[in-house]
């Protein structure tokens, strides 16, 4: 808390009220995202090198924002993430927000599909699709904004091996994710800090010949972010750190997430650029 | 009159085939095997041969197990998600045997098992010396990617506590081609006596069976054995089990599939 105050207080001199959306025209945008891993896990899933677990080479996507009136809006984005020598991850998310200043609540859905087979991730634990729903209450106070989020994510089963004529599959029970975030807008800059609690669902790996179970785990992730609003472009820099991973090898099977959450590395930095027209 | 004649013939067959001791031998092929080496961590499970040796500091061991069930991967996934026992490898031993016999089900009961032999064949037809290779029980589960240091890759708990395999010393076995309950080792054959162990498994449904290590008793030049993937199916690792008992229910069974561990 002390660190957060020291982080925010000097910037309060530049604080301004969070800008209220005024345009009611639909706006389209474009997004580019690139990440680097600062610290990786020591263990790797079978047949997958540490290099393959680096953040995506890049993500490109499109945005749609429709703002009807203050606090009532709709947004959607769809993007494709390219993993070096591995394949693509497609992700889409849409939500609508309702509320009356200073409150807003967003409700949304998200879907993700990984098509990594054929590259470094042949028969991998990472090939799956997922569906998620989320609710995100927000509260605005002067230049500060706070938000909570609860996300429920269901991940499909996938085949991870087929050796000796025996198929091995992995299946996950749904993840539950809680997030809390505090941000402040200071002139063109917005700084935020967030913390996420991932209740990763029980995971089973089984074939006709055996089975192995990884019990539900709580993994935590912090994020510090800085965005600059350079209309029509917005630049963002994010630092992520994952905590409480006590079994790194099991974690990589239980949380095979590259995008939009990057949980297959301990510490990472992402750079994001958005153009909203 | 024709019906009466046929009925009489059938009655005679029934009378002749039942009420006396009959023996049935079934061959159960293994489904998964591999070998591990203290010189490399490669995955050998897809190979057509297995290697066992102990010479000059280089040791290779065969890792194999009996087939463990009739449940498919989807059923086992559900079992693991909903069953805490799956925190370790869960291996209910239910051995599938296709029985082609004219005797009744009564013969094929665990109590009637009179012989069970684990049989393998060398690739080049050579015969390793009798008593040079010994099977030992493993005390924990392993995956097909098993190597000298790692039983499975799914968790940091997947490392062997003892490199080369964690062993269960509660039961010991005779080395190859010694004290066999039936038959002998022909040229190229490597056989191990398993009757007592096999009987204990099939009389206790849902027993855990984590498999065997086959290792050289002492110095042993490399022996190469046919694996599950061999092109010569008849030489793949197998259990040869013989059941001897009375055909007690007086009926003639049809060829059928049954589960030996079921009552």
Image (tube, coloured by chain):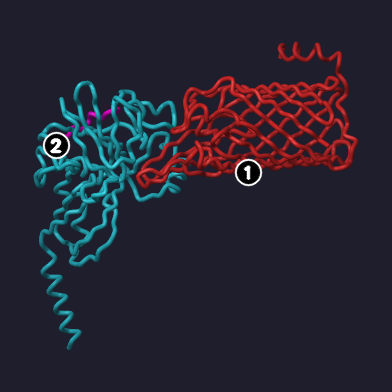
Say which residue label 2 marks: B176
Residue A1, horizontal then vertical, whole percent: 71, 14
Please state if B10 lies on the left or on the right of A142 as rendered: left
Residue at 41% across, 37% down: B85
Q: Are marks 1 and 2 in contact (CB under 8 Å)?
A: no
Residue A128, horizontal then vertical, whole percent: 55, 42
Of residues A17 and B205, the one nearer the viewer is A17
Question: Most prominent secondary structure in the magenta stretch?
Answer: loop
Of residues B247 and A170, the one nearer the viewer is A170
Instruction: Assess disc 1: are there few (<14), some (14-19) or many (≥20) residues with their C-alpha within 10 Å of its C-alpha.
Output: some
Residue A242, horizontal then vertical, whole percent: 59, 23
Chain that the image shows in red: A
- Residue B169 drawn in magenta: yes
Chain that the image shows in cyan: B
Label 1, label 2: how many angstroms apart (C-alpha)? 55 Å
The region drawn magenta spans B165-174
- Dividing the picture into quarters, in which one does residue B119 lie? top left
Of residues B16 and B193, the one nearer the viewer is B193
Q: Chain of mark 1?
A: A
Please state if A210 lies on the left or on the right of A56 as rendered: left
SS for callout 1? strand
Of residues A33 and B35, the one nearer the viewer is A33
Q: Which mark is residue A131?
A: 1
- Residue B108 drawn in magenta: no
Residue B263 in view here? no
- Dividing the picture into quarters, in which one does residue B190 lie? top left
């Amino acid at each position: 808390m002390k660190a957060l105050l020291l982080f925010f207080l000097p910037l309060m001199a530049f604080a301004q009220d969070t800008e209220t959306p005024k345009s009611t025209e639909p706006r389209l945008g474009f997004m580019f995202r690139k990440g680097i891993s600062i610290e990786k896990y020591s263990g790797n899933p079978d047949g997958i090198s540490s290099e393959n677990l680096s953040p995506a080479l890049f993500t490109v996507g499109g945005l749609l924002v429709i703002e009807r009136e203050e606090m009532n809006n709709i947004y959607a984005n769809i993007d494709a993430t390219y993993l070096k020598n591995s394949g693509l991850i497609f992700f889409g998310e849409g939500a609508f927000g309702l509320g009356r200043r200073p409150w807003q609540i967003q409700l949304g859905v998200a879907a993700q599909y990984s098509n990594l087979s054929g590259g470094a991730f042949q028969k991998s634990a990472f090939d799956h699709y997922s569906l998620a729903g989320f609710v995100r209450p927000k509260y605005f106070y002067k230049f500060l904004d706070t938000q909570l989020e609860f996300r429920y994510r269901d991940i499909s089963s996938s085949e991870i091996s087929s050796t000796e004529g025996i198929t091995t599959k992995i299946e996950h029970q749904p993840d539950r994710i809680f997030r809390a975030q505090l941000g402040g807008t200071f002139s063109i800059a917005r700084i935020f800090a967030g913390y996420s609690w991932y209740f990763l669902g029980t995971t089973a790996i089984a074939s006709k010949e055996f089975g192995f179970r990884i019990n539900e785990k709580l993994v935590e992730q912090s994020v510090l972010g800085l965005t600059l609003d350079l209309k029509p472009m917005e630049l963002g820099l994010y630092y992520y750190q994952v905590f409480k991973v006590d079994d790194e090898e099991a974690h990589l099977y239980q949380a095979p997430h590259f995008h939009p959450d990057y949980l297959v590395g301990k510490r990472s930095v992402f750079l994001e650029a958005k153009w909203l027209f | 009159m024709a019906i009466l004649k046929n009925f009489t013939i059938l009655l005679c067959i029934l009378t002749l085939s039942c009420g006396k001791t009959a023996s049935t031998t079934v061959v159960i092929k293994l489904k998964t095997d591999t070998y591990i080496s203290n010189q490399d961590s490669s995955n050998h499970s897809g190979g057509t041969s297995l290697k066992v040796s102990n010479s000059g500091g280089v040791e290779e061991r065969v890792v194999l197990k009996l087939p463990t069930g009739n449940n498919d991967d989807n059923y086992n996934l559900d079992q693991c998600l909903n069953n805490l026992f799956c925190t370790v490898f869960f291996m209910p031993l239910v051995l599938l045997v296709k029985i082609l016999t004219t005797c009744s089900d009564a013969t094929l009961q665990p109590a009637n098992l009179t012989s069970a032999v684990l049989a393998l064949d060398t690739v080049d037809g050579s015969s390793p010396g009798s008593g040079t290779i010994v099977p030992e029980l493993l005390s924990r589960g392993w995956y097909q990617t098993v190597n000298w240091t790692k039983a499975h890759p799914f968790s940091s708990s997947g490392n062997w506590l003892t490199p080369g395999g964690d062993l269960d010393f509660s039961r010991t076995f005779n080395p190859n081609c010694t004290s066999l309950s039936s038959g002998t080792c022909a040229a190229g054959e490597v056989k191990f006596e398993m009757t007592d162990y096999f009987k204990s498994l099939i009389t206790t449904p849902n027993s855990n069976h984590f498999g065997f290590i086959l290792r050289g008793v002492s110095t042993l030049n490399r022996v190469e054995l046919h694996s599950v993937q061999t092109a010569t199916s008849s030489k793949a690792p197998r259990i040869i089990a013989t059941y001897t008992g009375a055909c007690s229910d007086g009926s003639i069974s049809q060829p059928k599939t049954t589960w030996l561990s079921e009552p």
